[in-house]
Amino acid sequence: MDGVADDHILLAPPFIITESQMDDLLAILGEAITAVERSLPPELRG
């Protein structure tokens, strides 16, 4: 992974993140991915 090519997401939470904060981060990320997926044409949806 070079940060330039292909599709990827880099998460860099602080080292002092709590479990609750990590749960929130993942919930928000999941909602964002779902929103993007729904906006794609049907033939591009995974």
Image (cartoon, rainbow, N blue to C red):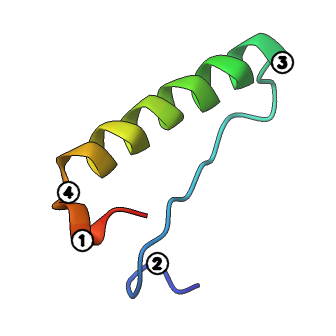
The x, y position of residue 15, in whole percent, is: 80, 35
Residue pictured at 27% horizontal, 70% vertical: 44
Q: CA distance from mark 4 to mark 3?
A: 32 Å
Precedes in sequence: disc 2 or disc 4: 2
Residue pictured at 76% horizontal, 11% vertical: 20
**Which residue type does callout 3 highlight?**
Glu
Precedes in sequence: disc 1 or disc 3: 3
Task: Give yes or no for contact between labels 3 and 2 (Cβ–Cβ under 8 Å).
Answer: no
Q: Is residue 20 above or below residue 40?
A: above
Taking depth in this image into account, of 44 and 36 the one nearest to the observer is: 44
The x, y position of residue 29, in whole percent, is: 50, 36
For numbered disc 4, what is the local secondary structure?
loop
* Tag 4 residue: 40
* Tag 2 residue: 3
Task: Give yes or no for contact between labels 1 and 3 (Cβ–Cβ under 8 Å).
Answer: no
* Front position among marks 2 and 1: 1
* Front position among marks 4 and 3: 4
* Front position among marks 4 and 1: 1
Q: Is residue 40 above or below residue 43?
A: above
The numbered disc on residue 19 is 3
Q: Quadrant of the N terminus?
A: bottom right
The numbered disc on residue 43 is 1
Q: Quadrant of residue 24?
A: top right
Residue pictured at 81% horizontal, 25% vertical: 16
Task: Give yes or no for contact between labels 2 and 1 (Cβ–Cβ under 8 Å).
Answer: no
For numbered disc 2, what is the local secondary structure?
loop
For numbered disc 3, what is the local secondary structure?
helix
**Which residue type does callout 4 highlight?**
Leu
